[in-house]
Amino acid sequence: MASKKRGLGRGLSALIPDNIEADLLNTEESKEQVVELDINLIVPNKNQPRKEFEKVSLEELKNSIQQYGIIQPIVVRKVEDKYEIIAGERRWRAAREASFDKIPCIIKEVDEKEAIKLAIIENIQREDLNPIEEANAFKSLMNTYNLKQEEVAEAVGKSRSYVANSLRLLNLDEEIQDYISEGKISTGHAKALLGVRNKKDRLSIAKTIIDKKLNVRETEKLVSKSKRKKTGKSTVEKDPFIKEIEERLMSTLGTKVTLISSKKGGKIEIEFYNEEDLQRILEVIMNI
């Protein structure tokens, strides 16, 4: 297991501003670096966390650029004889669609690792990523910089439980992740599906959600019904107080939690899906 880098928690606010691109554009040094570059010399960042670019959104941006020009320069870095995009790939794509020959750029001298960080943070803060892209972006930040969830949460201005629940989506089957990316099912649906252990049942329920346009509450009922069929047991309505505790624990730990009480005490069952997920949960518990 990789050792964690210390001291990053306090320094992240200095390393990663609230708005990466605004910070890059607002210094006197940056203003002097705005240059017009041949659009054919610019290439997308291969580590760009955003994989889907909506055609309608790009068309609207292209029309705006044709009418008003590119108001905000994109941010690039020099890589051999090309310029790799750090921030502003949508503007670059729209400018190409608008048949622009040149595009205003700010050239930053950063290495590949720093460029990845800037690209990820810029996209997350602009809310341009779908839920799966966002989850992969969080994971990339954690793996690339050996950060804990709380450090990533601080960097991107999200709660720790938000980051934890986002990462849980990556435990779902690829088919279901595709449904989420395509907007066919929501993260609320996905949260319910995480409680289904059997892959065949998960995929079947996911398809039913899409075919019958089930809402989240209907999906939760379908999941409960599927579980009862598997166990052959009828469920007893839980005490609202117990359910509230379970919900609070699930929100904090980012995984399914079951509280089982009895006259003599009880126990708390915490589910994990693989070794990486177990490590994540342990980190949360030890930092509470």
Image (tube, rainbow, N blue to C red):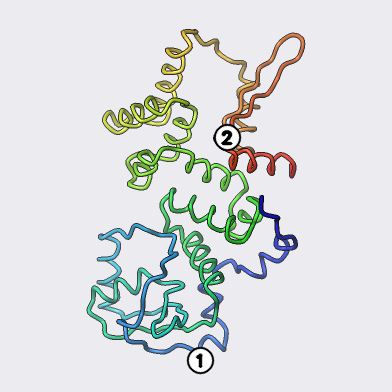
Identify residue type, mark 2: Thr
Disc 1 residue crowd, few under 14, some 14–19, many 20+, Cα 10 Å: few
Q: Are marks 2 and 1 in contact (CB under 8 Å)?
A: no
Instruction: Please give the residue where the numbered disc 1 appears in the rendered image.
Output: 32
Asked where in the image residue 165 lies, by quadrant, the reply is top right
Distance of label 2 from label 1 (alpha carbons): 49 Å
Left or right of residue 267, residue 254 in this image? left
Name the residue type under label 1. Answer: Glu
Location of residue 198 in the rendering, given as x and y in whole percent from the top left corner: 43, 25
Residue 179: x and y in percent read 34, 41
Rendered image: mark on residue 40: none
Query: In this image, 213 relative to 1: left or right?
Result: left
Residue extending furthest front?
1
Instruction: Decide: is 161 above or below 16.
Output: above
Label 2: which secondary element: loop
Left or right: residue 114 versus residue 78 is right
- On the rendered image, what quadrant is the C terminus found in? top right
> Disc 2 vs disc 1: which is toward the camera?
2
Point out the residue furthest to the bottom here. Answer: 32
Q: Which residue is mark 2?
A: 255
**Who comes first in sequence, dot 2 or dot 1?**
1
Name the residue located 61 percent from the left edge and 28 percent from the top edge. 257
* Rendered residue at 64%/57% (across/down): 146
Question: Which residue does the image show at 42% across and 83% down from the upper left?
Answer: 105
Q: Residue at x 58, y 56 (%)?
A: 143
Q: Position of residue 87 (x, y in %)?
A: 45, 72
Nearer-the-camera pick, 170 or 264: 170
| Image coordinates for residue 63, horizontal then vertical, percent | 25, 72
In the depicted view, which residue is nearer to us: 38 or 62? Answer: 38
Dot 1 falls on a residue whose secondary structure is helix
